[in-house]
Image (spheres, rainbow, N blue to C red):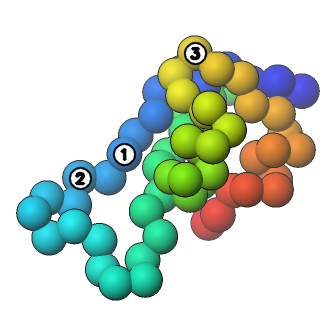
Amino acid sequence: MKYLITDLIEPDNGCEGFAEGEEPMVTLVLDDGRSVKVPDMTAYKHGWDTGRHITDEEIAEFAKG
C-alpha cells in the first residue's frame, strides 16, 4: 500500500550539529497518522518529501527505531 508523506520533520541540532558518527535522521509523517524515522540521506536519495508517496515495503526496509 502507498502512503502520502504529509510532513517531513528534521531535527534542529543548533550550532552543536551532530555528534561524530551520528547518522542524521528525519521523521516522515504519513497520511495514516504514522510517523516513521529514516536516515536523512535515505530520504534524500529516494526523493521522500512532503507530497510524495512511500510504500510499506520501503518503510520496513529503511525505517529505524
Q: Quadrant of the C terminus?
A: bottom right
The image quarter in which residue 46 lies:
top right
Kind of residue indicated by mark 2: Asp
Q: Give the SS element for disc 2.
A: loop
Q: Earlier in the sequence, mark 2 or mark 3?
A: 2
Q: Position of residue 29 (x, y in %)?
A: 54, 34
Closest to the observer, 39 or 41: 41
Which mark identifies residue 29?
Answer: none
Residue that extends furthest to the left in the rendered view of this protein: 15
> Where is 29 relative to 61, above or below?
above
* Rendered location of residue 25, percent (x, y): 47, 58
Q: Which mark is residue 10?
A: 1
**First in sequence: mark 1 vs mark 3:** 1
Q: Amino acid at mark 3?
A: Gly
Q: Please give the residue where the numbered disc 3 appears in the rendered image.
A: 51
When the figure is inspected, residue 14 is found, relative to residue 33, above or below; the finding is: below
Q: Give coordinates of residue 11: x percent, y percent.
A: 32, 52
Residue at 52%, 22% in the rendered image: 50
Rendering quarter of residue 64: bottom right
CA–CA distance in space, label 1 to label 3: 16 Å
**Quarter of the image with the N terminus in it:** top right
